[in-house]
Amino acid sequence: MNIFKVTLKSKKHSFNNLGWLRIVNLIKLYKLQLLQPRILVFTVIASLLPVIILLIMAWNFVHQPLIELEKTRLDDQVLAFRGYTAASEKGLINLTSSYANWTDLFTAVQAEDIVWINKEVTKQLIFSTDIDVVEVVKNPDEEVIAAQGSALNIPRVRARIKVLQTQNIPSQALIDTGQHGLLLLANAPIYKSDGTGKIQSPGSLTLGQLIDKNWLDKFSDYSQPTTKLEVFSLNGKSIVSSSDDVNLDNWEESYLAAEILPDIREGRSYYRLQPNSGLNTIYTPIFDSNQPVAIAKIQIVSHYFNQAVASLTRWIFISLSLAVLLSLVIAKLLAKQISQPIIQLAKRSKTLATGDLISPIPGVKSGGEIGQLAKAYQEMAESLKALIENLEHRVAERTEEIEIARQTLEVKVQNRTEELSIKNHKLEQALRDLQLTQTQLIQAEKMSSLGKMVAGIAHEINNPINFIYGNLTHINEYTQDFLELIRRYQQRFPDKELAEYAEEIDLEFLATDLPKILASMKIGAERISQIVLSLRNFSRHDESAMKQVNIHDGIDSTLLLLDHRINPKDGLSSIQVIKQYSKLPFVECYPRQLNQVFMHILTNAIDAVEVMQQDKQIIIQTEVTEGEQVKIKFIDNGCGINKKYINQIFDPFFTTKPVGKGTGLGLTVAYQILKNHYGNISINSSLSKGTEVIIELPQVIHKDTAA
């Protein structure tokens, strides 16, 4: 009985321990079941984080260049506006100088012929041009003898005109008149057409043009029809606008003084990008004597900028959505792949604890660490040695396979790299050929248009100058006859009144000076004839086919066209051109193309020597080599070229000149033209020691060689 009771107590205690063990196992099973959602959340976060970072970086990398590109578009409109303003200023000063350099006006101002001045100058300018203000002043008392334009009554305009008149040279100014808006003024002293009378000018001529809506409409035709332009003063008052809206918007009223005006006063432009409004705006200063006098507000349509930003946003959103979806799918698969076998193995381990060694362990046939763990549960210690040997054998086999695969992959990668290198070289060569072809087409079209224009100008000038030149001899003879007649008349019929009039007009001086004037006119006509001949020789519009020409004629024609740079009139020292010509045979070539080569080389030589203060020199040598090649050398003592750039000098768009000075196409086109002529070009240069350009051309291009 006691033994039975003890047995019952032991069984009862065992049952209690088994119950607690089941409760603990259930808790562990519940924690293992929570593993799958944790793995899911971790995988989603880990995969999305780098994607989001990359998308943010892509947004910043692409969005900022879009903004800079839009600012560049606005800057282009500012350049166009300033170019148009400069053209208006130049046109006004030229118009003022041309009227002021007029003998009839000189005489009328001296005689105070107000009727003639109002008719021939004031009214003529007001009704036939865009001039709004005209004023003629007589020296030395600065008496206004003719005036037209209400803006002349404004004190600040009067004060600025007096400043311009004191300069005694053609000058200009831009004034904010207030109620009349911006006024562009130009003043020039009055003197005779032949240049005399400058020292004691009888007066000055002042012309003015208002920057009004008509002026803005012409600028819109010059730039883009969709461009909106408004000019307002530094205090925010609207002066003129290309649209009907002439008031500042709410943003401008709030930020004009705080943000826009500080940049304007320092000579900088202010950008205002408004994608939602459909317009992007730039505020840029309008200068007079390097001081801002007004603000130009230029607006362009932001349609394409908005499209680009919308496309970028759409691309970012789609990429993010796809990344989230892909992350969820991958996370679900990984969570299922990792957590499911672990949970199954945990359940089976509980049955192993109860002594169930017959049931198969889940995951035995699966690969990876879970499969190995399942096999370890099943085989335990008795299979440990066999498992290790099997594992070592498998590792050796796998290592051998990996080594073979690595060697095979290296060979494939090397072969593929060689193929890609060959293809890349071919693509680079094709790209260079395409760029060179495009460059040649553009340059050929430009030179063709220039040749047509030059030939047309030469033809139009040739006829009237021949008429003038042909009649100068007759005019000279007639003049001599008239002077002889007057002399004989004075000797035979002396008269006191006629003698006084002859003395008043200085007849003796006229008789001496008139033949000199006719001789000067003859020299000028001959000079124009030489220029026309040079233009025709340079353009050779009617000689586009290959023919035999004199190389010296082409070089001389090019030099004559560049005479304004070789012998400048603005006070700079002239360039000494030394011709060392040898006797050359005629060369078979395309004359117009060869003249283009001479133009590019001589232009580069002039650009190089212009930086020199003195002793500017260009030497041109020609000779025939032993191989019957014609050799032409252009040698200058200019700034030279750094030797590290010599190998790049014939590359398209490469230039050593400052930005805006050269295009990098001249020597590229020259190289290709000489290559088409089966000639050579080489350059020897050192920095600060000058440059030598050598051209070699065959005398005759054989047909079999050309083929």
Image: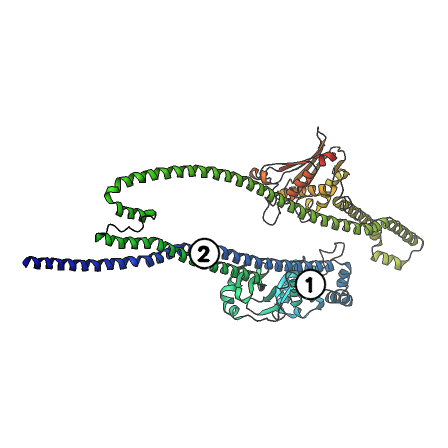
658 w.r.t. 397: above or below: below
Q: Is 689 in front, or is 599?
A: 599
Where residue 316 sits: x, y (%)? 47, 58
Q: Is residue 258 visible?
A: yes
- Image quarter (top left, top right, bottom left or bottom right) of the C terminus: top right
Q: Dot 2 surroundings within 10 Å: few (below 14), some, or many (20 or more)?
A: some
Where residue 645 sits: x, y (%)? 57, 40
Q: Dot 1 surroundings within 10 Å: few (below 14), some, or many (20 or more)?
A: many
> Which residue corresponds to the image point at 69% horizontal and 63% vertical from the top-left?
206
The three-letter code of the residue at mark 2 reads Leu
Quadrant position of residue 183 = bottom right
Q: Is 480 in front, or is 454?
A: 454
> Which residue corresponds to the image point at 37% horizontal and 54% vertical from the top-left?
334
According to the picture, the residue beneath numbered tag 2 turns out to be 55
| Inter-mark Cα distance, 2 to 1 | 63 Å
Give the image's coloring scheme: rainbow
Q: At numbered mark 1, what does the secondary structure look like: helix, strand or loop?
A: strand
What number is the disc on residue 206? 1
- Residue at the outermost right position: 492
